């Protein structure tokens, strides 16, 4: 059977597109990603990057308050993210928001496939998708909402200690025993680095931020929060030279090098290293079949639309947005892609 709409990705963009296309009775199939160790390490598990964050303060409709009872009434018991009953968060969290979006899409008839698309043939219509699990799926319209994954520096020592003290997700790993009450280091100078650092202060004895310049790139409010925190110390004009450790203990420290005086180095004794240096769009499976910008993000080819360079293929969320990168903008473009796909199918006579 040829699907009318297939949505690849399960972040805010994907689920919003699913809500709109499901309400239009297009019976969309959402390929939400596979649960694999590779995806865990890359941060590309189902529910997207937002599921790797803590409190979400800037998504409209969720002011401060204990949402425990609401979550329990809205979601199946097995899908309710853990909340500390003694100290519940004061607003919605990323995993909770994603579970609510997912459930809303399912309520309207969206279907899910927990798998990865590893190959797509967009040269023929219907489009042909092949999954990691061996399925072949054909689709009349395709919405790509695969987001972007965290970057690493590419150091040999970084690769050696992945899952042994090296991480790109503080929310995923920060509460692990290996990091509790120990000094940690975060690399980066943007909002993501500030958020990671502030989250880690809940568990670490101290958090170092290593930044290659003398001024943070983060928004003013996030920079002020980080710089004003008593547990955070910024190492300005510095880069990571090497991650130190051994096979038994994992990460035991990092050696940083000055960008002003390359001969000057310093060793920080830390138990964990967190990379927060940007993202790469998840478009490998497309193999260049869609027009992309210089950073590898899918290009929208019509102003104010989510159209791509292939007719019938639409893009939504961070996979096509390297500027705003917010949950609300991802959801907004998910809405646009859902409507664009619905109207395109109608114009082509695919009812």
Image (cartoon, rainbow, N blue to C red):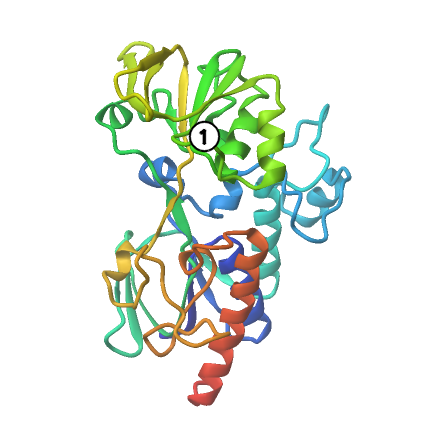
The residue drawn where x is 22% and y is 26% is 156
The residue lying toward the viewer, choosing from 195 and 123, is 195
In this view, 105 is above or below 265: below
The residue drawn where x is 57% and y is 76% is 24
The residue lying toward the viewer, choosing from 262 and 36, is 262
Question: In the image, residue 220 lies at what x, y percent?
Answer: 60, 39
The residue drawn where x is 37% and y is 66% is 299
Mark count:
1
Q: Quadrant of the N terminus?
A: bottom left
Question: In the image, residue 124 lies at what x, y percent?
Answer: 25, 77
- Which residue occupies the extreme front position in the image? 260
User: For this view, does 338 lie left or right of residue 162?
Assistant: right
- Which residue occupies the extreme right position in the image? 65
| Residue receiving disc 1 | 214
Quarter where residue 254 is shown: top left
In this view, 43 is above or below 344: above
User: For this view, does 5 lie left or right of residue 153?
Assistant: right
The residue drawn where x is 72% and y is 38% is 68
User: For this view, does 166 lie left or right of residue 68?
Assistant: left
In this view, 246 is above or below 168: above
User: Can see residue 192?
Assistant: yes
Question: In the image, residue 325 lies at what x, y percent?
Answer: 50, 52
User: For this view, does 346 lie left or right of residue 164?
Assistant: right
Quarter where residue 268 is shown: top left
Q: Residues within 10 Å of mark 1 (few under 14, many from 20)?
A: few
User: Can see residue 131?
Assistant: no
The residue lying toward the viewer, choosing from 248 and 110, is 248
Question: In the image, residue 294 lies at what x, y percent?
Answer: 30, 58
In this view, 328 is above or below 187: below
- Is label 1 in a helix, a strand or a loop? loop
The residue lying toward the viewer, choosing from 282 and 96, is 282
């Amino acid at each position: 059977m040829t699907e009318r709409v297939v949505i690849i990705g399960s972040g805010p963009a994907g689920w919003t597109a699913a809500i709109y296309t499901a309400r239009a009775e297009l019976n969309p199939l959402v390929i939400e990603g596979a649960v694999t160790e590779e995806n865990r390490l890359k941060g590309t598990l189902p529910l997207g990057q937002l599921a790797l964050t803590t409190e979400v303060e800037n998504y409209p409709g969720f002011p401060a308050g204990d949402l425990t009872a609401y979550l329990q009434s809205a979601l199946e018991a097995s899908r309710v993210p853990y909340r500390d009953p003694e100290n519940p968060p004061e607003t919605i969290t990323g995993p909770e928001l994603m579970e609510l979006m997912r459930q809303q899409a399912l309520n309207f008839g969206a279907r899910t496939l927990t798998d990865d698309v590893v190959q797509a043939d967009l040269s023929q219509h219907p489009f042909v998708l092949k999954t990691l699990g061996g399925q072949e799926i054909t689709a009349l319209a395709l919405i790509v909402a695969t987001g972007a994954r965290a970057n690493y520096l590419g150091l040999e020592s970084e690769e050696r200690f992945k899952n042994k003290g090296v991480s790109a997700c503080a929310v995923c790993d920060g509460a692990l025993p290996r990091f509790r009450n120990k000094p940690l280091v975060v690399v980066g100078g943007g909002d993501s680095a500030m958020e990671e650092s502030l989250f880690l202060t809940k568990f670490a004895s101290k958090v170092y931020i290593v930044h290659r310049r003398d001024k943070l790139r983060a928004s003013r409010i996030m920079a002020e929060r980080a710089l004003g925190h008593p547990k955070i110390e910024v190492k300005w004009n510095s880069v990571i030279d090497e991650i130190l450790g051994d096979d038994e203990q994992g990460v035991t420290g990092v050696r940083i090098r000055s960008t002003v005086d390359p001969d000057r180095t310093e060793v920080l004794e830390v138990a964990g290293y967190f990379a927060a240096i940007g993202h790469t769009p998840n478009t490998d499976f497309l193999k260049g079949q869609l027009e992309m910008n210089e950073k590898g993000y899918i290009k929208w080819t019509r102003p104010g639309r989510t159209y791509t360079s292939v007719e019938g293929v639409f893009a939504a969320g961070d996979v096509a947005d390297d500027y705003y990168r917010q949950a609300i903008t991802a959801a907004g473009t998910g809405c646009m892609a859902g409507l664009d796909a619905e109207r395109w199918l109608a114009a082509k006579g695919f009812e």
